[in-house]
Image (spheres, rainbow, N blue to C red):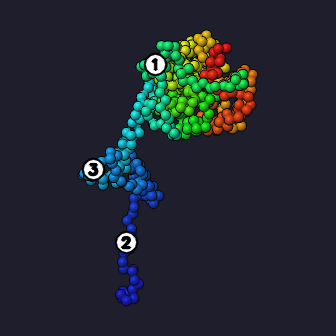
Amino acid sequence: MASDDLNAPLGQSKKKQRLPKLPGNAPQIVAGVLGLFGLAVVAWGVFGNDPLGGEPVAVVATTLDGGQAKPDAGGDRERARHDGNTAKAPIDSAVAKIANEPPPGSKTVTIIDGSSGKSREVLIPGNEAGGAPKGPTAPKMPVNQALLEATRHGLVPKIGADGTRSFTVYAQKKDIPAGKKDWPRLAVIVGSLGISASGTDDALAQLPPPITVALAPYASDLEALAGRARAQKHEVLVQVPMEPFDYPDNDPGPQTLLTSLSADQNVDRLQWLMSRFQGYVGVLSFMGGKFTASEPSLSPVLQELGKRGLIYVDDGASPRSIATQIAGSQNLPFAKADVVLDATPTPEEIDHALARLELTAREHGSAVGLANALPATVARIAAWAKTVENRGFVLVPITMVALKAKSS
């Protein structure tokens, strides 16, 4: 018997609709989706042009030439909002141009490594570059033009027609009372001035006149710095970089005198170094352990210094140095550092080194100390200098020790 519509169970007359069958099972589908996502990320990294990684970008209109900003023709500004390279390129280019532009008066020198033959260019600031060191304006301290000779690098010292020498003209002779003439003499050199403006200011402000100062040849505005030192009654030396034993791993700087170069090449480099400024009494070796132990290399250099009326001071860097013997044979005014005062730059060790300097002077009649223009060193030397005569010593400039060594 057929059931009527009222009594028939609901849903039995309708056919069930099956869901469409997907190709593959569920894990395969998930793996495929993840693979497509990975390919999209890789494609974006390779072909995308967004160095900022999607970070927000702000675009600011600017002009580096002081003029008005040009109209943003063709929608360039809007494109720059979405393209980091477009926004950064003009600024980076201009900044790089300014940074790479050498300061006025600078010159580029080509340095040839004597051991490997490789060459490199080094920018050396000119005497007009960089501005004068901070501190009081130095009065004009003219140099004796009759004691200068023109070379391809510039003016260098020479002996005057009447026999006048730079080490006598620029010496700061100290009058020693009759009762102190037999006292032991102490000469102290503070080197590397000009590298740090603040360190140079501190040194010239604190050190008394008998202290000799040595200027690094790579500093800026050397003429003004040398004039300022001379105005404060300091004798001035120029530091000359010489080859150490571990060169070129330990490189003193451009125009270093090298044992691998000929005598003419080293003399040419020496003239470059001597041309950096004028008004000094002599040169101070810098490093130079290997160079000062080589008679064929050192002898022509010391001969050149003697011909130009200068003194030579050995920094005592090497016990193998033969500078004493060569200088004596060439009748060259000469001195050698006996004690490095800040080999360990702490106040206690500097005080100990100063005590050794005094002991050396008592034993030999004179002694030379060498230090760098470090704040702790300058402070300790300045304090020591105030009391040194109370202990029976005379503090003198370097020429008064070098001349005494020559006469003996």
Could you say which is closer to the camera, residue 151 or residue 384?
384
Q: Residue furthest front?
A: 178
State the separation of the CA atoms marked 2 and 1. 116 Å
State the separation of the CA atoms marked 1 and 3. 58 Å
Of badges 1 and 3, the one in the foreground is: 1
Secondary element under disc 1, as helix, strand or loop, is helix
Could you say which is closer to the camera, residue 325 or residue 90?
325
Looking at the image, residue 113 lies above or below residue 387: above
State the separation of the CA atoms marked 2 and 3. 69 Å
| Mark sitting earlier along the chain (2/3) | 2
Q: Residue at x 74, y 26 (%)?
A: 359
Q: Residue furthest top?
A: 329
Quickly name the residue at label 1. Answer: 146
Type of amino acid under label 1: Ala
Residue 255 in sight from this viewpoint: no
| Mark sitting earlier along the chain (1/3) | 3
Secondary element under disc 3, as helix, strand or loop, is loop
Where's the N terminus, which quadrant?
bottom left
Type of amino acid under label 2: Gln
Quickly name the residue at label 3. Answer: 70
Residue 123 falls in image quadrant: top left
Quickly name the residue at label 2. Answer: 17
Looking at the image, residue 286 lies above or below residue 91: above
Q: Residue at x 50, y 35 (%)?
A: 138
Of badges 2 and 3, the one in the foreground is: 3
Could you say which is closer to the camera, residue 31 or residue 140?
140
